[in-house]
Amino acid sequence: MVSLILHSTPLIASDELMNAGRASSIDLLLDNAIRRGLIAGGVVVVGNRNGLLYASTRGNLFQTPGSPALTERTLFDVASLTKVIATAPAVMKLLENGRINLLDPITRWFPELEGSGREDITLLNLLTHTSGIDDMEISADDSLKKALIKTASQNSPPPGDRFRYADINFILLGEMVRRVSGMPLDMFCREHVFAPIGMADTQFLPQADTATLIAPTAGSNKALSAGIVQDMNARRLGGVAGHAGLFSNASDLTRFATMILNQGSYKGARLFNERTIAQMTAPYFYSKGRIVRGLGWDIKSPFSAPKGDLFSAMSFGHTGYSGSSLWLDPEQDLFVLMLTIRLDYQDVRQFSRLRSDISTLAVSIFSHPRMADEISNNVQAP
């Protein structure tokens, strides 16, 4: 287990890179968001290929007196981070082992879609959200097969250059992992992705005995609940789906990010070969070059709020609707992880700004220290 010691005051990793005044600005950003009711609390971790550089927590599990404070072990519903922490890595393991090909037509694994007009969709289209398929709400009484047939019958454009972010792409990929491997997505990920690098807490369908360690998410009625995936389609698919449903914490996600920055290896344990990591994070250009995606990963798109202004052009990451984000920059050897208990889902602009401000401040401290003081001075208490 990674020994992350998180405090409400920052860890000083290097006198040359960071001082207490700069670090306190990240805490202040979280505190301001809590006071505005944007979040109830959060965890921010900054690291590199060697592990932890800085970490901080603010807030408690619940807004009641005596509620436990958030820690590095608190599990969060990471929402769409499921796509890049679980599903895309599972797909890449199958690819690395020669079980699949990125140009496989979707009908190789979903013969029920023969004759649907969707035969030209490839696994690459699904990984880059260029399948042309739009999202749909899965009914409570729908089997996945019925949902797929309904989706395929939609009057959607053919696959190709146009980027259209849609959860259905990764729902299909999650099911494809099951059909190819013979193992449900959660079991495959636990055995072939999480366990090899010690991500012992990361899981779908968290067990009841860990309920006190799970950060709550807000439901449609704004009531907070813990341990049940927030995304309704993931719920209707039994809590295990390729687009959402994963629960993880700062400790495990630090391991994962460190593995990526080490080109597939974590403390001597090799999860992927270097070629696989390079393939997963290579840029694919869509929508006349306006959108840049990796295999699952976001590089440049309307969803790139955590990227900030100081990451390199080839940095990559992803966000989660529930309040999570992870952005990595191999060129600057840095990652920034944010996990929050998001309360206000209406103020998208302010939440995107929080993601951007935290990542910009973090990268300024560790990669552009001369700019850090100027940026820190602009962070003011409300």
Image (cartoon, rainbow, N blue to C red):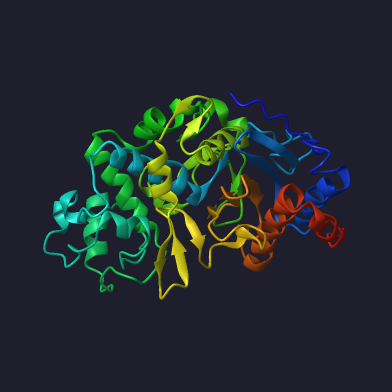
**Residue at figure coordinates x 50%, y 33% from the top left:** 202
From the viewer's side, name the closer residue of 194 and 281: 281
Q: Which quadrant holds the C terminus?
A: bottom right
**Residue at figure coordinates x 80%, y 58% from the top left:** 371
The image shows residue 179, relative to residue 299, as above or below, that is above
Task: Give the quadrant of residue 86.
Answer: top left
Residue 73: x %, y % from top left:
63, 31
Q: Say left or right for 350 vs 113.
A: right
Residue 17 visible, this orientation = yes
Residue 143 visible, this orientation = no
Q: Say left or right for 250 vs 269.
A: right
Q: Which quadrant holds the N terminus?
A: top right
From the viewer's side, name the closer residue of 270 and 8: 270
**Residue at figure coordinates x 76%, y 50% from the top left:** 365
The image shows residue 227, relative to residue 124, as above or below, that is above
**Residue at figure coordinates x 67%, y 35% from the top left:** 52
Residue 239: x %, y % from top left:
41, 42
Q: Say left or right for 150 vs 108.
A: right
Residue 367: x %, y % from top left:
71, 50
The image shows residue 202, relative to residue 16, as above or below, that is above
Total residue callouts? 0
Residue 57: x %, y % from top left:
74, 40
The image shows residue 155, relative to residue 55, as above or below, that is below
From the viewer's side, name the closer residue of 258 and 62: 258
